[in-house]
Amino acid sequence: MPNLPAQFITLDGIDGAGKSTNLAFIRQWFERHGLPVLFTREPGGTPVGEALRGLLLDPDTQVGLRTETLLMFAARQQHLDDVILPALKKGIHVVSDRFSDATFAYQGGGRGVPLDDIAALEQWVQQGFHPDLTLLLDVPLEVSMSRIEQSREKDRFEQEQAAFFTRVRATYLQRAQAAPQRYALIDSHRDLAAVKADIEAALDRHFGL
Ligand SMILES: Nc1ncnc2c1ncn2[C@@H]1O[C@H](COP(=O)(O)OP(=O)(O)OP(=O)(O)O)[C@@H](O)[C@H]1O
Ligand SMILES: [Mg+2]
């Protein structure tokens, strides 16, 4: 295996795309290859980030769209400083369930915050740091909606209407199209074995295996 520095891999996509479900396959892949890895999530990953997550996902929270965007980046800054960057510096790969792509998709595409404003915050917080690979799980809107309906209680974002998720999904897909070398687009409207095979192939490719 080529001696790559520790990699930052993110898993993103609309609600119900299967991010949390497929984390298990990613975990198995890293175990199989004996690579050290840390799993984390956004918003969250630190005590302050998890507290902000609680606020952000709580259907009772009333918050403006600019505040919501800033809180996402506040959580992200702490996550980068305390968890992601220290792990990578120690040679530990990091896999995050959601990252900045979600802010572009939800606050940008979904809520209408100008994408340039989000890019400016991204630059301020990340200073040019980006995921090395983003596994973008994609499902048609109806599939996302029906999976959300069948799962747990809906969070603040999941209570949005179909038009919101249509814009979120379109923004994810536009981002993947604009930088195809960073994204692996995974059709997760298939049985889990097929999704797993695609995820493993994307990881093999990324790590040159
Ligand atoms: N390929 C699949 N086929 C059928 N059902 C699936 C598939 N992938 C995930 N699911 C189901 O869809 C539901 C949502 O999956 P999961 O929680 O992994 O999505 P998620 O992307 O993490 O969503 P969220 O953004 O809300 O956290 C779960 O009930 C899961 O079992
Ligand atoms: Mg999830």
Image (tube, grey):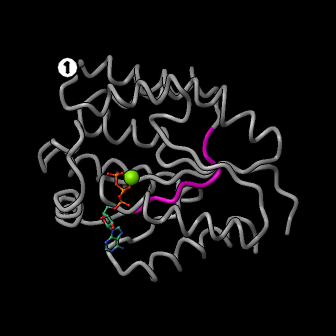
Q: Position of residue 31 (x, y in %)?
A: 71, 67
| 131, above or below 148, in the image | above
Please say if 194 is above or below 130. Answer: below
Q: In this rendered view, identify the residue nearer to me: 16 or 169.
A: 16
Secondary structure at badge 1 equals loop
Q: Magenta segment range?
A: 130-137
Q: What residue would you read off at disc 1?
A: 62
Decide whether the magenta segment is chiefly helix, strand or loop: strand
Taking 96 as reference, is 94 left or right?
right
Identify residue type, mark 1. Gln
Q: Is residue 90 magenta?
A: no
Where residue 207 sits, quadrant-wise, is bottom right
Question: Which quarter of the frame holds ligand 1?
Answer: bottom left
116 displayed left or right of 55: right
Q: Residue at x 46, y 30 (%)?
A: 50
When asked about the image quadrant of residue 103, the answer is top left
Residue shown at 24%/40% (left/top)?
Answer: 155
**Residue 46 at x, y = what percent?**
56, 30
Between 178 and 13, which is closer to the camera in this rendering? 13
Q: Measured along the vertical axis of the image, is residue 19 above or below residue 91?
A: below
